[in-house]
Image: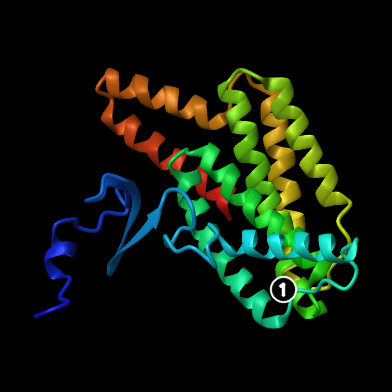
Amino acid sequence: MAGDLTHILESWEFDPDNQVRIIRAEDGREVLQIRQPLGIEQYELDGRPDGKTMEGRECYLDVLQDKLQEHIQAGGSDEGFQISRDQFRVLQNEGVIYYYRYLILFQIGDFERTVRDTEHNLQICDLVGKYAESEEDKNEILQYRPYILRMYAIAKAMISLHQQLKAAAKEILESAIEEIENMPNIDTPAFQFERIRSLKYLRSTLTQVLEQKSSPLDQLKQQLDSAVEEENYELAAELRDRIRTLKKEFEL
């Protein structure tokens, strides 16, 4: 039957411990795939996650930033520039697919691309917060800014730690904590929840950075490598579970 995906799904059985892979597509580019219980998702590693371009630009954020610059050049300032409800919906949907991708990128330790994607969504927050014509639209996006900033800061700090730049990691985390503490209040349950939880995780991570020579995740990975070398598979399985749990804690 045309369109039947059975043979594709059977070629990669669902395994909760082996859900992510990067493969080379027919044209040579690498793509990110996630095996779900009932299907497979595929993301581009670079550009928009769905591989689309928007009005000749890489993403819709670029389109609106171009429109803003054109408005400023024409009128001498950004006064009067607005993001309409329709434009907001397109931008919001773009932010969602970037969110789905950076969750997976964080899981597999691709912190450079995690920083890139979270930075993209932080720029969406900035643009919407300043220019959306609807306060409802602003709150709908900005209520998640603490979470996005937390993921951005932790990924960026992990890059610094891998480069043995502990002071830089400390500064990144402290800056994110201060920014979240100073965010204007948004009267939604999501904002209150994400603000409290993000501060908790950032402070916990900062404490670990200050107290330990390497990150908790790196330490567990080192212990896992040793356990495998010693053929202590029971300990290795336990360490894999702890690594998976730690990664999920940062994501949630």
- Residue 106: percent from left, percent from top: 50, 45
- What is the secondary structure assignment of the residue under circle 1? helix
Q: Name the residue under label 1.
A: 140
Between residues 135 and 236, which one lies in front from this camera angle? 135
Label total for image: 1
Task: Work out which residue is located at the far front of the displayed protein and give it.
Answer: 74
* Residue located at (44% from left, 64% from top): 52
In the rendered structure, the answer to whether residue 66 lies left or right of residue 134 reads left
- Against 155, is 146 above or below? below
Residue 94 on image: x %, y %: 56, 66
Return the x and y of residue 50 as percentages of the image width and height: 43, 62
Residue 66 figure quarter: bottom right
**Image x and y of residue 250, in percent:** 58, 47
Q: In which quarter of the image is residue 140?
A: bottom right
Q: In this view, does 77 lie above or below 201?
A: below
Residue at 73% of width from left, 47% of height from top?
Answer: 200
Residue 133: quadrant of the picture: bottom right
* Left or right: 179 as drawn, with respect to 213: right
Q: In this view, does 217 lie to the left or right of 181?
A: left
Tell me the quadrant of the picture where the N terminus can be found.
bottom left
Residue pictured at 34% horizontal, 30% vertical:
235
Task: For the C terminus, give its image quadrant.
Answer: bottom right
Label 1 Cα neighbours within 10 Å, binned few <14 / some 14-19 / many ≥20: some
On the rendered structure, is 154 left or right of 31? right
| Chosen colour scheme | rainbow
- Closest to the observer, 247 or 60: 60
As shown in the figure, which amino acid type bears the numbered disc 1?
A: Glu
Residue at horizontal 48%, vertical 39%?
A: 110
Residue lying at the far left in this picture: please name it: 1
Query: As rendered, which of 210 and 59 lies closer to the eye?
Result: 59
